[in-house]
Image: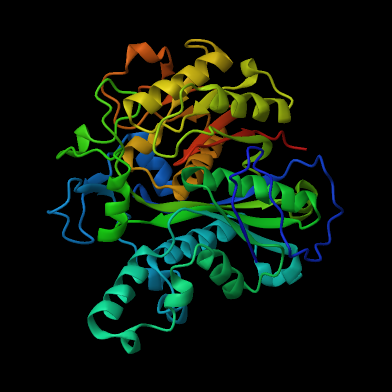
C-alpha cells in the first residue's frame, strides 16, 4: 500500500503495488460510478442523505460526542444513530477508530448499491483508494491519554495502526480480501476528489474496479482544537448562524463527520455485469496555490486553472456544464475567491452554483466525496439541491446561487474542493446514455 500526497500541482501520483488486474490498460477510458454509499449527518445511506438534502434540513447542532462547553466552537455535524456493529464485525471495531467505522460502513453500502460482491471476482481486480485528512482522532487521543496517565502498558497494541491515514484503506482491503493497487491521498478536503482521480488512473492501468472516496470523524477535543487553530471555524452559538457558504453573514465553517464511498468501474466491466451507472468521471485536474498554508491565496487563478483543465480533460466547454458544486468554504474571503474563479471560467451568473454542505458541516476528505455522490444524484434525478443554510446571498459574488431545489436537465456537473494549505481539485461528472 502506498500513501499518496497530492501536493504536486498536477495531482499526479504513483503506486508501488502493480496488481494483476484483468482489464487491458487504456489511457483514455472514462470510468463509471456504479455504487454510492453515504454515511453523513444527513443520514445513514444514500437515499436518506439525498432526501434530507433536498428538504434542506440543517443537521448542524451542538456537539454531543464530548463536552465542548469550554471551546470557542460548540457546533458540528454529527452522524445520527450510527451503530458500528450494524456494519462491521467486532474484531474490526476494537482495532480501529470511528473514522474507519464510517468509511467501512460507506463502502459496504456502495458495494451493495452496485450489486458488487468482491468474493465473486479475482482479488487483484478490486482496489481501494481513499482520501484522508486527520486519521484516527478518537482512538489516538484516548490511547495517548492512557500513556500520559497510566504508562505505556496501558496503551492498546492497535494504537500503531488505528490513527494512521491508511487505516481505512487497509482495513477495508483486509475485510473484503482486496489485493488490487491501493493507497490513500492526504490533501484535506480535496482528498475525496483526488481519490476518484486516482481510481481513474488505477482503472486505466488495468485494474477494473476501485472503491474510492473518503470519511472523517474529527469531533474530539484534540481534533476540534486543530480546527480552531486555523482561525476559520465559526463560533456562532446557533446552527442557523454558523456555516453559511456565500452568504453575506459568512463567518467560517463548522466541522462535521462522515463521508462517502463510490464504486468506480471500467465501463466494459460494468456493462458485462449489467450494472446501473450513475455517471462517468469525464475530467479532473488539480493545482496548488503555492501560498503560505495559513493564508488565503492572493487571487483565484489556480482554482480557475483547475476548473479549466478539468473541462479540457473532459473535452467540454464551460457552456456544457449544468451545475457547479462549489467548495463553499464559508469564510468571506475564500468564498469571494471561489466566486471569482467561477466567474472567470463561466461568466457572471452563467451557471447554477450550489454548496449543500452548509447543512451538514465541513467533512474534510469526506466532504468532497459526499459532494461527488450528491452531484451524481442530481444527474440521476434531474434536480439541483440548494446551497445549505443560505439566507442572503452576497451579491458581490455575482453567482447564480441555487436557493431552492431546481428541477431540470442535469447532464454535466463540475465539483470543486479545496484543501487547507492550498490544494485545489476539480472533477467533472457526466451522465452516460444507455447503450
> Relative to 224, is 318 above or below?
above
Q: Quick one: quadrant of the N terminus?
A: bottom right
**How are the colours assigned in the image?**
rainbow
Q: x%, y% of residue 263?
A: 62, 53
Q: Looking at the image, which residue sits at the far left?
A: 69
In the image, farthest residue toward the bottom: 153
Query: Which residue occupies 70% across, 23% down?
Result: 316
In-front residue for pair 177/192: 192
Residue 30 appearing in the image:
yes
Identify which residue is drawn at 85% across, 51% down: 25
Which residue is the extreme one toward the right? 24
Q: Name the spot of residue 291 as percent of width and height, x first.
A: 49, 33
Q: Judge whether 199 appears above or below 385 on screen.
A: below
Q: Looking at the picture, how far across and down is residue 232, in whole percent? A: 31, 38
Question: In this view of the protein, which residue sits in the foreground, 39 or 94?
Answer: 94
**Quick check: 56 left or right of 292?**
left
Given residues 383 and 250, the one toward you in this image is 250
**In the rendered image, which quarter contains the C terminus?**
top right
The residue lying at 43 percent from left, 66 percent from top is 101
**Lateral position of residue 82 relative to residue 303, left or right:** left
Question: Compared with residue 118, is residue 332 higher up or lower down, i.e. above or below?
Answer: above
| Residue 409 in sight in this render | no
Q: Based on the displayed image, in which of its 4 quarters is residue 432 positioned?
A: top right
Q: Which quadrant of the figure has residue 57?
A: top left
Q: Position of residue 148 (x, y in %)?
A: 26, 77
Amino acid at each position: 500500500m502506498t500513501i499518496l500526497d497530492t501536493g504536486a500541482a498536477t495531482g499526479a501520483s504513483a503506486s508501488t503495488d502493480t496488481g494483476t488486474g484483468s482489464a487491458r490498460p487504456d489511457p483514455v477510458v472514462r470510468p463509471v460510478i456504479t455504487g454510492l454509499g453515504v454515511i453523513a449527518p444527513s443520514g445513514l445511506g444514500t437515499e436518506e442523505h439525498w432526501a434530507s438534502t433536498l428538504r434542506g434540513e440543517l443537521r448542524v447542532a451542538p456537539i454531543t460526542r464530548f463536552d465542548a462547553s469550554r471551546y470557542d466552537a460548540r457546533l458540528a455535524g454529527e452522524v445520527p444513530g450510527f451503530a458500528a456493529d450494524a456494519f462491521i464485525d467486532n474484531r474490526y471495531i476494537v482495532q480501529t477508530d470511528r473514522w474507519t467505522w464510517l468509511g467501512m460502513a460507506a463502502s459496504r453500502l456502495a458495494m451493495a448499491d452496485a450489486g458488487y460482491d468482491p468474493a465473486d471476482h479475482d482479488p487483484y481486480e478490486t482496489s481501494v483508494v481513499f482520501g484522508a485528512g486527520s486519521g484516527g482522532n478518537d482512538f489516538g487521543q484516548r490511547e495517548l491519554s492512557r500513556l500520559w496517565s497510566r504508562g505505556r502498558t496501558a496503551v492498546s497494541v492497535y494504537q500503531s495502526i488505528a490513527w494512521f491515514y491508511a487505516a481505512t484503506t487497509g482495513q477495508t482491503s483486509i475485510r473484503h480480501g482486496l489485493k488490487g493497487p491501493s493507497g490513500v491521498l492526504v490533501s484535506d478536503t480535496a482528498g475525496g476528489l483526488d481519490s476518484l482521480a486516482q481510481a481513474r488512473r488505477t482503472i486505466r492501468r488495468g485494474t477494473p474496479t476501485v472503491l474510492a472516496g473518503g470519511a472523517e470523524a474529527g469531533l474530539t477535543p484534540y481534533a476540534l482544537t486543530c480546527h480552531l487553530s486555523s482561525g476559520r471555524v465559526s463560533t456562532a452559538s446557533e446552527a442557523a448562524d454558523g456555516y453559511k457558504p456565500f452568504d453575506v453573514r459568512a463567518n467560517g465553517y463548522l466541522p462535521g463527520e462522515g463521508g462517502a464511498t463510490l464504486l468506480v468501474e471500467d465501463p466494459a466491466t460494468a456493462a458485462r455485469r449489467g450494472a446501473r451507472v450513475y455517471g462517468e468521471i469525464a475530467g479532473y485536474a488539480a493545482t496548488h496555490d503555492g501560498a503560505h498554508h495559513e493564508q488565503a491565496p492572493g487571487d483565484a487563478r489556480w482554482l480557475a486553472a483547475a476548473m479549466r483543465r478539468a473541462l479540457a480533460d473532459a473535452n467540454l466547454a464551460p457552456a456544457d456544464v449544468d451545475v457547479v458544486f462549489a467548495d463553499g468554504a464559508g469564510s468571506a474571503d475564500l468564498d469571494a475567491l471561489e466566486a471569482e474563479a467561477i466567474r472567470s471560467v463561466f461568466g457572471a451568473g452563467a451557471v447554477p452554483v450550489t454548496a449543500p454542505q452548509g447543512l451538514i458541516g465541513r467533512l474534510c476528505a469526506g466532504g468532497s466525496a459526499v459532494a461527488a455522490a450528491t452531484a451524481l444524484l442530481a444527474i440521476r434525478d434531474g434536480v439541483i439541491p440548494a446551497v445549505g443554510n443560505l439566507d442572503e446571498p452576497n451579491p458581490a459574488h455575482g453567482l447564480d446561487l441555487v436557493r431552492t431545489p431546481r428541477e431540470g436537465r442535469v447532464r454535466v456537473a463540475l465539483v470543486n474542493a479545496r484543501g487547507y494549505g492550498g490544494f485545489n481539485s476539480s472533477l467533472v461528472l457526466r451522465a452516460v446514455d444507455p447503450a
